[in-house]
Amino acid sequence: MPYHVVSFTMAQVRQGALGFQRQLSAALRESSQLKVYSVSPFDLDERRRIKDRFGGDVVYFFNDAARDICKLRGIELEYVAEILDNELPRRRALVVGMPD
């Protein structure tokens, strides 16, 4: 399953770029399959590797269901890459979604 990568600078975060989290959390009733991950805040090496690979200071990984809900709700995000699930960070945090 592909994941869609979005990266934000700290300036974008300060300007409210993370508002999508609140909107997607509300959408969990519509689709319990949606998942958005970030790199674990405790794995500094992995955070650096992901930052070097995708740019930005904060990087998120959206599955297809999360991306589709964003489109339906008019949440505009710039996807910088697409990766497979085996390329996700080893240690990651579930930002939006139901734990498996």
Image (cartoon, grey):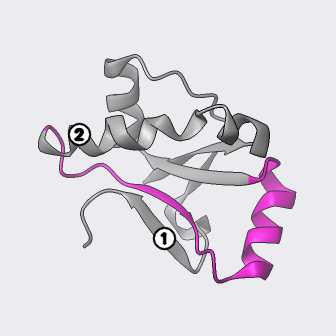
- Callout 1: helix, strand or loop? strand
Residue position marked by numbered label 1 in the rendering: 93
Q: Earlier in the sequence, mark 2 or mark 1?
A: 2
Q: Is 36 drawn above or below residue 68 in the view shown?
A: below
**Which numbered disc covers residue 50?**
none
Give the vertical position of 90 relative to 62 (above or below). below
Pointers 2 and 1 in contact (CB under 8 A)? no
Residue 66, x across and y down, in percent = 37, 41
What residue lies at 18% left-to-right and 51% top-to-bottom? 32
Quadrant of res 28 = top left
Image x and y of residue 48, in percent: 82, 69
Give me the residue at 42% from left, 35% from top: 67
Residue sitting at the far right:
52
Looking at the image, can residue 80 be seen? Answer: no
Q: Nearer the viewer, residue 77 or 10?
A: 10
Disc 2: CA contacts within 10 A as few (<14), some (14-19) or many (>=20): few
Name the residue type under label 1.
Ala
Name the quadrant of the C terminus: bottom left
The picture quadrant where one finds residue 86 is bottom right
Residue 16 in view in this figure:
yes
Q: Is residue 39 magenta?
A: yes
The residue lying furthest to the front in this view is 14
- State the quadrant of the N terminus: bottom left
Residue under the image location 49 percent in, 60 percent down = 37
Magenta extent: 30-57
Residue at image mark 2: 26
